[in-house]
Image: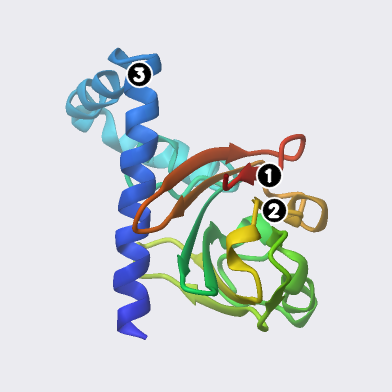
Amino acid sequence: MSFTHIRLAVLLLAIGALAACGASETTSPAPVAPETVVEETPAAEPESIETAEVDHDHDHGEEAAGGEPHTHGVADLALTRTGATYEAELVSPLANFGLSEADGVFTDTVLSELPGLIELTGGDCTANAPEAEVDTSSGHTDGHVHITWTCTNPDAVSALRFPGFASFSGFERVNAVFLTDTAQKAGELTPSAAELSLK
């Protein structure tokens, strides 16, 4: 269990690094501005805490963009390949699944929808049953969904898809990354563009 969490942390750092690279190519001043704002806000912190409590249902965590954000509507998805096995790890606020973060559990209804949450295109792959757990270690309530596939033709896997947008309307954007020993691909998945090409 701890190895999975270590590997997840490494993958999430890679997502952050890839996202930072993309942000610095398009708008280099953007990463600097939030740091300046964070340094200037300690005096106003009591007011922002009250605002955060009122707006917690959707806006909490937006200040942390680029770190380990907990922003409702947004999730991180990492896909790796080892031989004929592909593994995906989705980290998302529990609210994206339409669940109460205060309750901190995956309901049977949500668990029954998880097998169709993430798909691979091509490769003649068979998915194992998804594993889901709740993580509160960041001070927020996140859901972790882990899925593995065994593929008879792993080189023919051409894309990662997130049909979860149709099942769970709370997902607005998924930051996806595909990592192997020789390749890295990253992209932002949305309901209108729910696929990341792996080729």
- Element type at mark 2: loop
- Residue 83, above or below 101: below
Circle 1 Cα neighbour tier, 10 Å, few/some/many (<14 / 14–19 / ≥20): many
State if disc 2 and disc 3 touch (CB < 8 Å). Answer: no
- Element type at mark 3: helix
State if disc 1 and disc 2 touch (CB < 8 Å). Answer: yes
Please state, as top left, top right, bottom left or bottom right, where the N terminus lies in the image. Answer: bottom left
Q: Residue at left 46%, top 36%?
A: 51
Three-letter residue code for mark 3: Glu
Circle 2 Cα neighbour tier, 10 Å, few/some/many (<14 / 14–19 / ≥20): many
Marks 2 and 1: which is nearer the front?
1
Please state which of residues 135 and 122 is positioned toward the viewer in this rendering. 122
Residue bearing mark 2: 162
- Residue 195: assigned label: 1
Residue bearing mark 3: 25
- Number of numbered labels in the structure image: 3
Q: Is residue 29 left or right of residue 192?
A: left
Three-letter residue code for mark 1: Glu
Splitting the image into 4 quarters, where does residue 40 fall? top left
For the residues labelled 2 and 1, the Cα–Cα distance comes to: 6 Å
